[in-house]
Each structure stands twice: as structure tokens, then as C-alpha cells.
Image (spheres, rainbow, N blue to C red):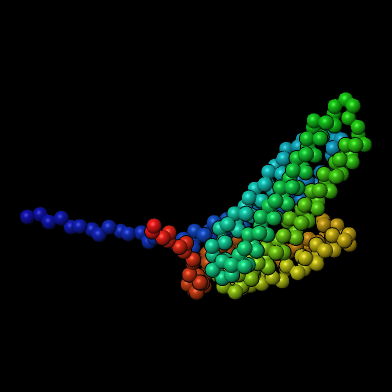
Amino acid sequence: MTTTAHTPAVTRPAPDPMRRTSLAAGILYLITFVSVPTLMVFQPVQDGADFVLGAGDDTGVLWGALSEVVVALAGIGTAVVLFRVARRQSETAALGFVTARVLEAALILVGVVSILTLLTLRNDVAGTAGADPASLVTTGHTLVATYNWAFLLSQSLMPVFNALCLGYVMYRSGLVPRILPTLGLIGAPLLLASDVAVFFGAYDRMAPIAALAALPIAAWELSLGVYLTVRGFRPAAVAALTPPRRDPEPSAA
């Protein structure tokens, strides 16, 4: 009689939803850094007169505008992905983080629209007969000023509130090493002070001191993105979180 040996089926461990959350959040945080090169790409645009009346290839500026749209969407994505985790530590801080991210994205898109409008003036209006160079220069300066103010409020001021809200959650929960949110919590008042100085004209937003004040926040966001992508949340900290809320079951009629 022949006997057939039955090998037990290999069961794969169920995917950890918290690991998926941390991985998605980490990747989205890293994506928000794709707009860093736009600081150089948009440099020719900063002189509204020369740019709107000049000629040249606009491809770099278009790619820069597209990258800022990606950053705006990725920023909202980080808030959406992390909200369910952050609210288990502090619902107030979680809502504050989502609100700040949405405002940041909206202001980024205002800046993008300003840049794209400037490109339209340059390509479709500046070369036409009867176009008034003085009016074009004035409009160009207005659009550049709109972009600069939108940048200050979106990509410089809003990260202060992002760091305070999410940094508080991450520090209290211990989901990541506390040195990471400490960078954000220390950097937030430094960047806020720098933003106020820029707002009142003490120095330009591109000044070296402004870049130096932004370094701790940048280090916090970059290190958080790398850690969440590579390591994920600390298991012990996840276990200590308040259990997730469940929507109430609809009552039977």
C-alpha cells in the first residue's frame, strides 16, 4: 500500500496594517522633498521684468510647477495616512496636523497658479502687437510677489504648525525615536521667528539666515520619512496607543 505524505500548507503572516501605514507615510514624506530643486529652477522667474519680456525655454519652470503640485498632494497624503494613528494619541493634534497640511497645499497651489499665469503672459501676450511692456512688467512683479508670499506662508510658516502638531504626537507616543520629533519641536520656534523677520522685511526669504533657521524642520521631516520607510513605528509604542475607535453599528429598525 502506498502512503502519500501530506505537507502542511505554509501560511504567510497577515500583513501589518500599521507597517503599511508607516511605509506609505514615509514615502509620501520623502516625496515632499522633490520641490527642493525649484528654489534654483524658479530663480530666473524672480526677476519679473526680465522674465516676462524675455525669451527662452520654459521647460524647467513647468517641471518646477508640476513638482510643487506633487508636493501639495503628497503633503495632504501624509496627513490623511497618519490621521488614524495620530488621533489615538491626541485627536486635537491630529486635526491640527490635517488642517495645517490642507492650508499648506492650498497656498502652494496659489503660488503654482501665479507662476503658470506668468508663463502665459510671457508666451501668449508679451510678443503680441500692442502689448504694453510697462503693464506686463507691473503684472509680472505682482505675480512674482504673489508666489513669494504664498511660498512664505505655505512652505515656511505651515511647517511650523505641522512640526508642533505631529511632533507632539510622535514625542508623546514614542512611535519613532524621540530625537526625531525633538528636532521638529526645537526647529518650530526658530523657523517661526525667521518667518516673522522675513514678514517684516528684516531679511529676504532666500537669505542664508533664513535657510539656516529652516534646517531643523527639514532634518525632522527628512529623518521621519526615512525612518518610517525603513523601520516603521515602534511595536511597543503601537501597542500602548489608545485602541482605534470603531464606528457604531447601525441600530436595527
> Residue 69, percent across and down?
67, 47
Considering the image in quadrants, where does the N terminus appear? bottom left
Q: Residue furthest front?
A: 253
Front residue of 1/60: it is: 60
Q: Is residue 144 above or below residue 103?
A: above
225 left or right of 18 in image: right
Which quadrant of the figure has residue 95?
bottom right
Q: What residue is shown at x 64% (from left), y 62% (from top)? A: 97
191 left or right of 50 in image: left
> Residue 89, percent across and down?
56, 70
Can residue 82 be seen here? The reply is yes
> Residue 140, percent across and down?
85, 41
> Residue 218, percent across and down?
70, 62
Q: What residue is shown at x 65% (from left), y 67% (from top)? A: 165
Q: Is residue 23 above or below residue 131?
A: below
Can residue 223 be seen here? The reply is no
